[in-house]
Amino acid sequence: MSSIVDRDGERKNISNQVRAFAKDFNFKIKLCKPRHPFTKGKVETVNKFLAWLLPYEGEFETEDELIAILNKINQKVNTYPCQETNMPPLVLFQKEKEYLQPLPSDDVIESYLPHDRQTTVRSDSLVTYHNCKYSVPPEYIGKPVRLLVSDNTLRIYSSTDLIAVHALSTKRMNYQKDHYQQLLTQTMKEADMVAELAEVNLKQMDAFL
């Protein structure tokens, strides 16, 4: 649940990463109450698999053999009528398939797979992740970097060096103040003007982007 919801005191908000996933795959998220009857059955079903495995104790030694047994159990269970609908899950699934929406493009799907993404830092000292831009130190402009996402946080690496950390955001442009100031110093020499201009520009970005 913690990977889906961010808590702010008593308030619960869907995390930005999950919200973006739902938008890309065109579905809505409804938060359920913990220990609600609707979720209780799902937990109990998972626990039943452990009981169903007991008769097979000692009949498997490898992971592949265990997976084969689980598949066999799963196929058998899917033919049993459900107490709620009096229909087997396999029949209901075939019916529900008629209403499934098409998946998004391969590029969108690929962006959610659990592996590092490679990209190159743009001339504005930004990299793009899920249509949002995040800053790195300007010294890495034009260089390849790796993007790694976990716990709603974007970590950016150059080789094995961690060069920037951002909380995932829905804002189109996300500059860290020191990165933006370093970028301005490449074209401006007056330190006081750099700090002042950076402050003004960043506020405007927050207001309009």
Image: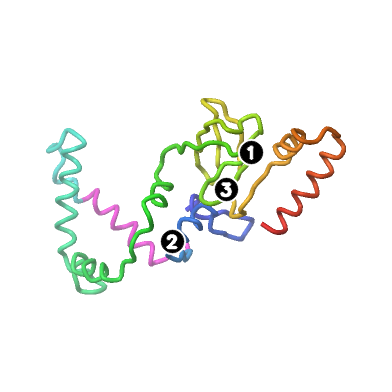
* Side (left or right) of 135 relative to 99: right
The residue pinned by badge 3 equals: 168
- Residue at far left of view: 59
x, y percentage for residue 86? Answer: 20, 74
User: Which of 158/4 is in front?
Assistant: 158
Question: Residue at position x 18%, y 45% from top?
Answer: 54
* Residue 61, quarter of the rendered image: top left
Q: In this view, does 150 lie to the left or right of 137?
A: left
Task: Using the image as rendered, state which of residue 93 and residue 9 is in the foreground.
Answer: 93
Quadrant where the C terminus sits is bottom right
Q: What residue type is labelled 2?
A: Arg
**Magenta segment:** 32-51
Residue 117 or 123: which is nearer the viewer? 123
> Mark 1 sits on what residue?
125
Q: Name the residue under label 2.
A: 35
Tag 2 and tag 1, C-beta contact below 8 Å:
no
Mark 1 neighbour class, 10 Å CA radius: few under 14, some 14 to 19, many 20 or more: many
Main SS of the magenta part reads helix
Q: Is residue 163 above or below residue 57?
A: above
| Residue type of the residue flagged with mark 3 | Leu
Report the Cα–Cα distance between label 2 and label 1. Answer: 46 Å
- Callout 2 environment at 10 Å: few (<14), some (14 to 19), or many (20+)? few
